[in-house]
Amino acid sequence: MKKFAVISTLALSIIVLFLSGCVGTNKLPAGAQSPELQAIIILPVATLVSSDDQANLKRAQQLQRGAETMDRLLTDYFAEMDNVKVISVEQMQVLSKNYRSSRAEQAREIGQRLGCDAVLLTTINRYGERQGSDYSADQPASVAFNFKLLAIKSGRTICSGFFDESQKSLFENLLSFSGAARRQFKWITATDLAKEGIQQRFATCPNLRHQ
């Protein structure tokens, strides 16, 4: 019964997803022009795993944890943006099970089915957790990811970017005083670093940044 309940809940979420489509709920003032993108879908974060990484179980596990963390951060980041729909891993598995195309083509096909304008593809390349405490770290947090916002109809890249940082001490980088002060001169976690990366890099993309 428990297994059936889980499957039923997932099936219901997929049905709701298709019924609601990808239509934003923002209402524009009379006479105002519609924004370039009315509706965006956010796909689960992918991991960049090579054949060497598969043999390195620790790195593969780090990337998987990083992808799960990024998914949560993206859900939080877009929570108040009514024109954005975040697709869960479980929903993605159901939506993509009949596709054999590339990830970008698959994303566009799903977006078309949901009636969206654009799709955000994010890939995490590195995710290393801090080893130590706030004020003493043997190994600093290290995060790298890239993203691409694709127009579903044309397939063109609307905007893209990447984030790649391993936290350095103030003594290692004398130009990092402002960043160190913002972090209260602490060694931050990989989660905090990834959150900073999302906020910084998405701010460069008008369709993704908070207004």
Image: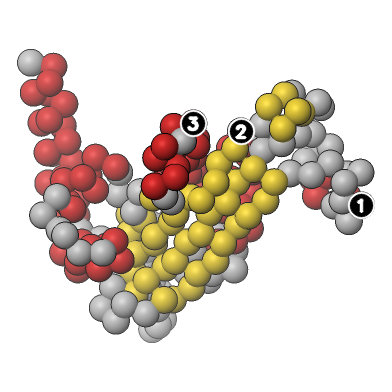
Instruction: Please name the amino acid that badge 2 sits on.
Output: Glu
Instruction: Please name the amino acid that badge 3 sits on.
Output: Lys
The residue that mark 1 highlights is: 174
Q: In the rendered image of this protein, does residue 175 appear above or below residue 112?
A: above
Residue 103 quadrant: bottom left
The residue that mark 3 highlights is: 58
* Quadrant position of the C terminus in the picture: bottom right
Query: Taking the image as drawn, is residue 23 in sight?
Result: no
Residue at image coords 56%, 62%: 162
Residue 199 quadrant: bottom right
Whether residue 44 sits left or right of residue 107 in the image: it is: right
Question: Regarding mark 3 in the picture, which secondary structure is present there?
Answer: helix
Residue 201 quadrant: bottom right
Q: Are marks 3 and 1 in contact (CB under 8 Å)?
A: no
Question: Regarding mark 1 in the picture, which secondary structure is present there?
Answer: loop
Of the residues under marks 2 and 1, which one precedes in the sequence? 2
Instruction: Please name the amino acid that badge 1 sits on.
Output: Leu
Residue at image coords 16%, 26%: 6
Residue 129: give its label. Answer: 2
Mark 3 or 2, closer to the camera: 3
Q: Are marks 2 and 1 in contact (CB under 8 Å)?
A: no
Q: Within 10 Å of the Cα at label 2, are there few (<14), some (14-19), or many (20+) other Cα atoms? A: some
Q: CA distance from mark 3 to mark 1?
A: 33 Å
* Quadrant position of the N terminus in the picture: top left
Question: Regarding mark 2 in the picture, which secondary structure is present there?
Answer: loop
Residue 183 % position (x, y): 77, 41
Residue 68 % position (x, y): 42, 38
Q: 34 or 53: nearer the eye?
A: 53
Q: In the rendered image of this protein, does residue 137 appear above or below residue 175?
A: above
